[in-house]
Amino acid sequence: MKTIFAVITIIALFTVTGSAELFMTRDEALNTAFPGDDTFEKIDIFLNDEQVNRIEELSRVRLESKIYIFYKFTYGNEILGYAVLDTHLLRTKSETVMYVIGNDGRLINAEILAFFEPSEYMQSEKWLMLFEKERLDDELRIDRDIPNITGATITSHAFTESVRKVLAVYEVAVKEGTN
């Protein structure tokens, strides 16, 4: 039944948008975050005003929501890391990305789950790999640690801001919140 629903969803997206790309569902993505015999639990995060201010200050990105869902991955009693899905606007349409974050606050992986802009604006795997092992600091910016994508400036800026935002939410609400 899930497969049929996924196929219908993909067909509907292509019909409505004409250029939708759904690469992976949430459940499929979460199962790839930490491959192996690991388990994960959902953590609902409801940010208060003080946390929002700290996150916006750290990330230099304005938050659109005070609600985030992180997934904590464990193996036995050991916390392997966290995953979070973020949907953000590019030009006029959105993309959804799963970010996998290690216990040290560094980005392990970024997986694009859905991309609704024309494909020529999509980031390459090589460009996405530039974010691996990055942490939230002043160098995690376009034209510093991260080069701009020629012809897809809006995409590169939106993606980089999204990374900064989720790393700041991790820092303030997950790490400091000891989830």
Image (cartoon, helix red, strand yellow):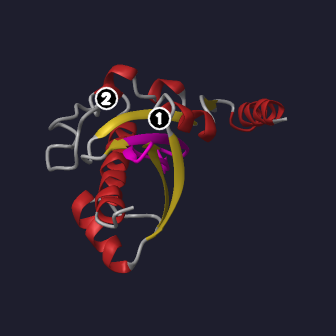
Query: Could you tell me residue 21's position as x and y percent?
Result: 61, 30
Amino acid at pointer 1: Ala
Give the magenta part as a residue range. Answer: 76-100
Helix, strand or loop status at disc 1: helix
Helix, strand or loop status at disc 2: loop
Q: Nearer the viewer, residue 90 or 6?
A: 6
Image side of residue 68 versus residue 60, left or right: right
Mark 2 Cα shell of 10 Å, populated few (<14), some (14-19), many (≥20)? some
Q: Residue at x 14, y 50 (%)?
A: 138
Could one spot residue 76 in this view of the protein?
Answer: yes
Query: Could you tell me residue 5's position as x and y percent?
Result: 81, 36
Could one spot residue 114 in this view of the protein?
Answer: no
> Which residue in the structure is indicated by mark 2?
149
Query: Could you tell me residue 17's position as x and y percent?
Result: 68, 37
Q: Nearer the viewer, residue 83 or 76?
A: 76
Residue most toward the front? 76
Q: Nearer the viewer, residue 63 or 1?
A: 1
**Residue 8 vertical position relative to residue 119 in the rendered view, above or below:** below
Q: How many marks?
A: 2
Q: Is residue 141 magenta?
A: no
